Amino acid sequence: MPLHLSPSFREALAASDRALIGMWGCAGSSVMTEIAAGSGLDWLLIDMEHSANTLDSVQSQLQVTAAYPITPLVRVPWNDQVLIKQVLDLGAQNLIVPMVSSAAEAEAAVRAMHYPPKGVRGVGSALARSARWNRVENYLAEASAHISLTVQIETTAGVEAAAEIAAVDGVDAVFVGPSDLAASMGYLGQQTHPEVLAAVARTFAAVAAAGTPVGVNAFDPIAAESYIAEGADFVAVGADVALLARASEALAARFIPSSDDAGRASY
């Protein structure tokens, strides 16, 4: 029986009349990912760049998210042709490639995403979850319709080349990373520095002028709301590990007396 794949992130963006809201999955846990997948958020990023996620853990997380109405994306750790091929073969339809700072780097990512003649992706669909082991009809011919590529701009060079990056055929969206951008600009840890915010705004404008959706990472709710107001098409507003960290700290603060409280109680 022929199987059908889910709509891509490109299609989800095109169909939405509001910013799509998502979060990161960094814990490498299928249970955590399944909990997030049922949250009602629009999209979930399974991160391989800043987490312990492996090919095995990514595949299991893609499998559990398949039962929920959420669009999963996988961020590969680098713009690497072999890694991109492997993650696609696991069944990831939507990839984010970090640290893209030029049109040439964006073009390399596009080539890695697609079979010849458009690209250089190796052919192994009969062996892979991507085509559901050849149960998706015409997968090889239609694979490009099932996938999306988001490239991440997070350096000063990327900001300057944003218009050219966004115009590359095969780049479906651009995701701005204020944390690394701030570091690149000499403002390490200062994602809301006025100069960083101005660079993000310039990137938004350049990408939008190219007709390409643009998104941003913003775990601070006020910053996220500001970016949405500025026209972001998609925003990451949290991460599984950060949510657990802050919630567990809140429990400790509420129920465990501070050292000052303990000292006063002893008198």
Image: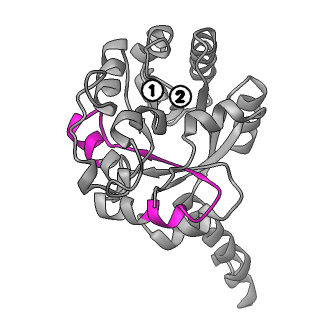
Write the residue at 66% across / 30% down: 14
**What is the magenta range?**
61-86
263 displayed left or right of 176: right
Q: Amino acid at mark 2?
A: Val
User: Where on the picture, by quarter, is residue 194?
Assistant: top right
* Residue 157 at x, y percent in the picture: 39, 14
Note whether residue 97 is visible.
no
In the rendered image, which residue does mark 1 sit on? 154
Instruction: Using a 10 Å C-alpha cutoff, classify the residue at mark 2 as few (fewer than 14 neighbours), some (14 to 19) or many (20 or more).
Output: many
Label 2 sits on residue: 176
Residue nearest the observer in this picture, 94 or 135: 135
**SS type, badge 2:** strand
Q: Label 1's element?
A: loop
Which badge, 2 or 1, comes first in the chain's sequence?
1
Seen from the viewer's position, the closer of residues 162 and 138 is 138
Q: Label 1: how many residues lie within 10 Å, few (<14), some (14-19) or many (20+)?
A: many
Q: Disc 1 marks which amino acid?
A: Glu
